[in-house]
Image: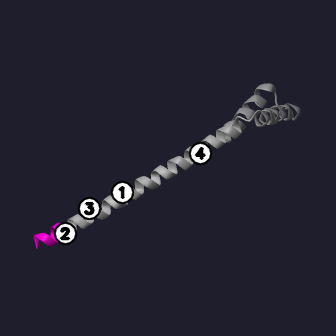
C-alpha cells in the first residue's frame, strides 16, 4: 500500500515538474517575442519622418479647432485630450 502511494506521489511530482518546465519555456519564448515587438515598435516610432508627420497632424488639428471658433486655450486642451486618449 505504501509503495502505491509513494509511486503515485512520484508520478504526480514528475508530471508537475514537467508542466512547470513547459510553462517556464513558454514564458521565456513569450518574453523574447514581446521584447522583439517592443524594439520594433520603438524603432518605428523614432523614425524622423513619422515624428514629423505626427507633429504635422497635431498642428493641423490645433489650427482646425481655432478656425472652427475655439480659442487658443480650448484648442490646446482639446488637442491634449485627443492625444491622451490615443495612448
Q: Are marks 1 and 3 in contact (CB under 8 Å)?
A: no
Considering only order in the chain, which callout, 4 or 1, is on the residue closer to the N terminus? 1
Q: Name the chief secondary structure element in magenta.
A: helix
Considering only order in the chain, which callout, 4 or 2, is on the residue closer to the N terminus? 2
Q: CA distance from mark 1 to mark 2?
A: 20 Å
The quarter of the rendered structure image containing the N terminus is: bottom left
- Residue 76 in which image quadrant: top right
Helix, strand or loop status at disc 4? helix
Neighbour class for label 3 at 10 Å: few (<14), some, many (≥20)?
few
49 to the left or right of 21: right
Query: Of 24 and 85, which appears nearest the observer?
Result: 24
Q: Which residue is mark 1?
A: 20
| Tag count | 4
Q: CA distance from mark 1 to mark 4?
A: 24 Å
What residue is at 44 percent from the left and 54 percent from the top?
Answer: 25
Neighbour class for label 2 at 10 Å: few (<14), some, many (≥20)?
few
- Percent across and percent down for residue 3 are 13, 70
Magenta span includes 4: yes
What residue is at 34 percent from the left and 60 percent from the top?
Answer: 18
Query: Of 40 and 83, which appears nearest the observer?
Result: 40
- Tell me the magenta residue range: 1-7
- Residue 68 in which image quadrant: top right
What residue is at 56 percent from the left and 49 percent from the top?
Answer: 33
Q: CA distance from mark 2 to mark 4?
A: 44 Å
Q: Which residue is mark 3?
A: 13
Considering only order in the chain, which callout, 2 or 1, is on the residue closer to the N terminus? 2
Amino acid at each position: 500500500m505504501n509503495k502505491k502511494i509513494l509511486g503515485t506521489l512520484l508520478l504526480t511530482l514528475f508530471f508537475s515538474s514537467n508542466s512547470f518546465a513547459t510553462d517556464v519555456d513558454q514564458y521565456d519564448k513569450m518574453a523574447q517575442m514581446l521584447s522583439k515587438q517592443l524594439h520594433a515598435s520603438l524603432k518605428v516610432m523614432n523614425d524622423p519622418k513619422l515624428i514629423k508627420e505626427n507633429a504635422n497632424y497635431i498642428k493641423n488639428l490645433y489650427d482646425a479647432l481655432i478656425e472652427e471658433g475655439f480659442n487658443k486655450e480650448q484648442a490646446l486642451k482639446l488637442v491634449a485630450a485627443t492625444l491622451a486618449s490615443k495612448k
